[in-house]
Amino acid sequence: MFKRRPLAIVFALAAVIALTASACGSSSTTAAASSTSPSSAAPVASTGSSAAVSSSAPASGAATSATSSASGSAPASTDLTGCTPDALKTKTGGKLTVATDNPAYEPWFSGNTPANGKGFESAVAYAVATKLGYAKADVIWTKESFNAAVSPAPKDFDFDINEFTITADRAKAVDFSTGYYDVTQAVVTTKGSAIASAKSIADLKGAKLGAQIGTTSLTALNTLIAPSTKATIFQTNDTAVAQLKNGQVDGIVVDTPTAFYMASAQLDNGVIVGQLPAGSGTPDQFGLLLDKGSSLTSCASKAVDALRADSTLAKLQTTWLANAGAPVLK
Amino acid sequence: MNTPTSTTTASGDRWTPSEIQLQRLAYRRSRNRRSTLIAGSSTVVLVLVVGWAIVHTQGWPRFRASFLDVKYGREVFVGILKGLWLNVRLMVVCEVIILILAMLLALARSLRGPVFFPIRAAATIYTDVFRGLPLLLVLYLLGFGVPALRISWLPSNSLVWGAVGLILTYTAYNAEVMRAGIESVHPSQRAAARSLGLSHGKTMRHVVVPQAFRRVMPPLLNDLVSLQKDTALIAALGTPYYDAVLQAQIEAQTTYNYTPYVIAGLLFLALTIPMTRFTDWIARKQGWTTAGATV
């Protein structure tokens, strides 16, 4: 009798597991069946096909950028009627209050003085103000930290311009205008390195270059430059900077805003070799940040669209970014 | 195996088991069959039940799509296999150096006599330091620290410094394993060897170390398997040499599909499990398993 007990235990155990599993299993299958919402349908649709899985990420990225830009540019008109200082309900009537962080960094601002109109974002802010019909003297600058600006808290400004990348998550808490800047990729190196004086992408082919894993920078490095030696892959940008300082790599690819920060702050003698031409993917965009549901959002977007249409943005980019040390490589 | 079905005794006359012995044997065989059957069926039932329960969870389709995508797995398999080749080469080169250094270190720690105090102390400090430091920290310090010194004749290759970091850390572990092995050899062995006129060096070489080495084979293999997996940590330094894990990471981070990680894991298992069985087999064949090891 004792000898048979293990067998009985095994079967009892199996029965218990089977019962529990069937209970869980049936309830979960009914749950899955009852919620035939898009969320549960999506994974089923992509089952077993890598193409579907891999394409879903760019697709959703495109979708978010589409929604973010849909707010103002749907008709893609540069019709600014109704966007006048008289019609706009700004914080201070007849004035436009613009915020940015303190300190404000080069090349986006100049000398930590946003009001001087120098630097890319300062210039864009004044260009937007002009489009909306404000005189330069009607623009009031105020200071707002980056993190406070992207929080859902009430805003003391009409719009904030501080290298805000438009993301779907942030857009839940604040409004964004359409993008005034498409983030490009740039090659950073140190003075005296082999590629410090490179003038074209061809000059970079033989260099030891690296980028952070899983970033658009790495994709740009592999597709746009396609170096002859394999790309050095970093887990973080800090390790990339460390290797660049040690001369273990000739240069690293990062997005242009990071490149400016690295060249000026992280590296002692950092140099931006140049920006890479736009790749095939949808780039990140910088947008003006406004209070959630602000009445100014559509006008701000229209102004930005108008500036893009009359190629003012492109000119400002050349003046304040390309000519400020990040020429576009061919 | 050693059941006396029919054997020849020393005198040569044929011995046949009695009726009762045959019954006994038949009973034993039937019990054996029965337990094999029970073990087999309970295993099958358990596997089926667990498998069924997993397949019927709510997230199973999502899980299968992102972790068990066979088609995508086939695409990335060759790349990861090539990466694994780097892990294997690194492991072999490092392990050879580690075993030599660890043995030297263990011997240094087991030197007797007050004259050798500095050597003993140095070996002890080395072991304490490198066993205590997290491996990742050692890798960072060597991989970024040494090239920062800008000594022109030293290599600045991250692979070299990563390997050095692995060697330094694992030497410390293995030296302790070997010291334990050396100390586990009974003092009478040493005494016997010395009384036969062998010097300390010869005692170590011919008597102590061979016995010690056999005893520490399993823990050494432990460290070897661990080393093999830790070769993937070199990727933390930033490297143009893609090992299996980094290759899987590159794929997974561009497609958000984790099948490459599963593949890399399976490849590592496919390497370590046969290695373990092989070493066990060698040990058995050589009769290395001592009474102390089998109990």
Image (cartoon, coloured by chain):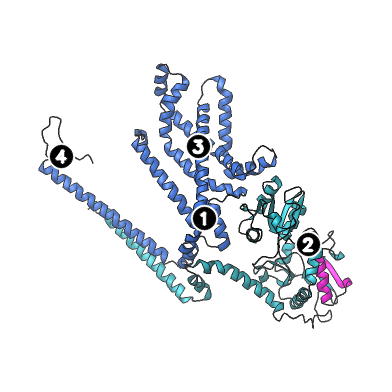
Q: Chain of mark 3?
A: B
Q: Give neighbour class at mark 3: few <14, some 14-19, many 20+ (Cα, 10 Å).
A: few
The chain to which mark 1 is attached is: B
Residue A223 occupies quadrant: bottom right
Can you give x and y, in whole percent of width and height, for residue A39 in the image? 53, 73
Looking at the colours in the rendered structure, which chain would you say is drawn in cyan?
A: A
Q: Which residues are magenta?
A: A121-141
What secondary structure is found at the residue carrying circle 3? helix
* Host chain of mark 4: B
Q: Mark 2 sits on what residue?
A: A322
Instruction: Answer with left or right where residue B262 lies relative to residue B146.
Output: left
Chain B drawing hue? blue
Whether residue A13 appears in this view of the structure is: no
Circle nearer the N terminus (3, 1): 1
Q: Going by the image, does A245 lie left or right of B265?
A: right
Q: Is residue B128 above or below residue A19?
A: above
Residue furthest toward the bottom?
A81
Q: Which residue is mark 4?
A: B6
Q: Which residue is mark 3?
A: B96
Placement of the N terminus of chain B among the 4 image quadrants: top left
